[in-house]
Image (cartoon, rainbow, N blue to C red):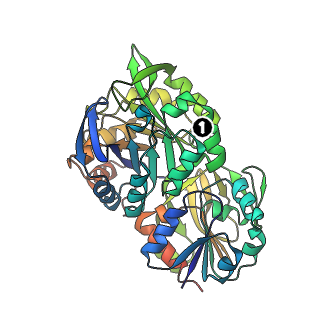
Amino acid sequence: MITKRIIPCLDVRDGHVVKGIQFKNHKIVGSIVDLAKKYSQEGADELVFYDITASTDGSTVSKEWVSKISDVINIPFCVAGGIKSVNDARSILNLGADKVSINTPALENPNLIRELSLEFGSQCVVIGMDIKTLDGKSFLFAKTGNELTAHSTEILALDWIRKVQKLGAGEVVINSMNQDGMKNGYDISLLNELSKVCTLPMIASGGAGSADHFINVFANTNVDGALAASIFHNNEYSIQDIKTSLQSNKINIRTSL
Amino acid sequence: MSVAIVDCGGANLRSVATSIERLKIPYVITDNSDEIIKAQYVILPGVGSAQNVMKHLESKNLNNVITQLKQPVLGICIGMQILFNYSAEGNTKCLGIFEENIDLFSKSNLLKVPQMGWNKVEFSDAKLKKLNDYYYFANSYYAKTFNSTKAISDYGSAFSSVVQKDNFLGCQFHPEKSAEAGVRFLKYFLTKS
């Protein structure tokens, strides 16, 4: 059967990989191409490249970086940031991306999900969901790349998952804003709540701070992959460290390179 | 040696091209029938939907060209699926090299669709066991196992991850995205004659 995926994420602003805490106070943590190459060689199962400023300033993800990354990796590659049309997606895919992830543009124009899946197939269409839980209810946030533009859409995460799967999405990334950069573990209860209605592959994001957090999310939820940023960028753990821990806990993962 | 990567109207030709370039083998990306016919190896790459890829090939009259090719041909993912008789994706009549049909995985709480990620591929031929490894898949549609199946994988049940008939080889996974295992598989294809 299919293995669980470990997915490093490069959040990029102005040509540098950055990392914030709860989507604020972003600091530069490294070079885009060097980190992409390193993670690919270390056995990452996939790479996510996210231009966090694109949707907030109305632009599209920087195409130059998409092709530079594509040239140095040989693993699947998902690109996010301000992709608003079939043509935007086509140019990103033609530069070497395998999937596009859309968040704000999908919230503004849900029919984009259907258009993309008819054109490129569902497997190309990832829905990024930035979720904050307030008083026990989980809402979607839009334009989250900048704390000045981030706002609640008042759409419930459960309703959105039901809708995007009908429209032809191929995967969802569940990004817990409460946990982002906090390094105290993935949001297990949110993931389990959303899993009840989700028939698509689901990726957990937000909160990874130790190998135990990866073990915990795979042992206690039905997610297909775990995305993380800080833990890898800071060299606290390598991809291989995490995989070795998962393997010794009988989680099904790919250990070959 | 030369490789023709057929522009099937889908996207992401670049990843396949990059993987061939890394092997230092000359290639062209083309939808020109003469260039395809004279290449030593032909690759049908794999992003798009069955109906769009077939529509594009028919508009260039490449459907007849491809079925007549005599050199080694590799179909990747959707490029493999269009070598079959028919695909349930968009009820599409395909090229018919393989007489079987392409079906949709049936969704359930236990089986998420599309299949997205790394799955184990097991070849039946003893000489190919060295290629047994994890490869990257991203597909909602699949081929059952049948008499041209060369390797199987499991997603809910066994399906064909590699098929071969005469000079036509097909893989459901993406070798260009399958790290070192994918490189070994491409090298295997590029040593066929």
In the picture as drawn, the residue positioned furthest to the top comes out as: A135
- Residue B9, percent across and down? 65, 59
Whether residue B12 is visible, yes or no, is yes
Give neighbour class at mark 1: few <14, some 14-19, many 20+ (Cα, 10 Å). many
Q: Look at the image and tell me in which quarter the C terminus of chain A lies.
A: bottom left
Residue at x-position 62% and y-position 70%: B30
What residue is disc 1 on? A113
Name the residue rendered at 36%, 55% in the picture.
A44
Q: Residue at x 25, y 43 (%)?
A: A231
Determine which quarter of the picture holds residue B43. Answer: bottom right
Residue A55: horizontal and vertical position, in percent?
44, 34
Residue B129 shows up from this direction: no
* Residue A9 picture quarter: top left
Q: Position of residue A70 (x, y in %)?
A: 42, 59
On the picture, is B169 further left or further right than B177? right
Secondary structure of the residue carrying numbered label 1 = helix
Amino acid type shown at disc 1 = Ile
Left or right: residue A210 versus residue B159 is left
